[in-house]
Image: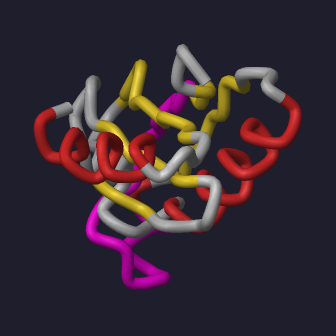
Amino acid sequence: MKEILADVERWREKGEKVAIATVVATRRSAPRPVGAKLAVSESGELAGSVSGGCVEGDVFEHACEVLRSGQPKLLSYGIEDEEAWNVGLPCGGEIDVFVEPLDGE
């Protein structure tokens, strides 16, 4: 949370809504550990990381939807290790990411 806190505080001071995506489970190899966070501001700024780049774009899109709807989402991503290597990714594995609006908005 420390890595995103300053950005989240700055966005909130400007009156922006913020969504927080958190890695809540991993299976096999995963680029980021449980607890890794990505914050998304209402204006589209990002802070932190949940995947080291592999699924960040999709999580961003879902975070924008969560900001519009106010409804949290649980997302699941996965790829087999062999397939990951074939397409140039450093690891396969699976991650679950919970995306929620930040309270107090």
List the single residue furthest toward the right: 69
- In front here: 96 or 6? 6
Instruction: Say which of 39 and 86 sits in front.
Output: 39
- Say which of 23 and 101 sits in front: 101
Q: Is residue 10 left or right of residue 79?
A: left
Q: Is residue 16 above or below residue 103?
A: below
Report the residue that reaches farthest toward the left.
Answer: 2
* Residue nearer the viewer, 34 or 83: 34
State left or right for residue 20 relative to residue 75.
left
Q: Is residue 21 above or below residue 56?
A: above
In the image, residue 90 lies in the stretch drawn in magenta = yes
Magenta residues (range): 82-98
Could you tell me which residue is drawn at 62 percent across and 27 percent down?
101
Q: Quadrant of the C terminus?
A: top right
Task: Give the total of numbered labels.
Answer: 0
Q: Is residue 94 left or right of residue 89?
A: right
Provide residue 34's location: percent of width, then percent of height: 28, 25
Please report the residue visible at 63 percent of the width from the left and 54 percent of the height from the top.
Answer: 42
Q: Residue 79 in the image: x percent, y percent?
A: 54, 53
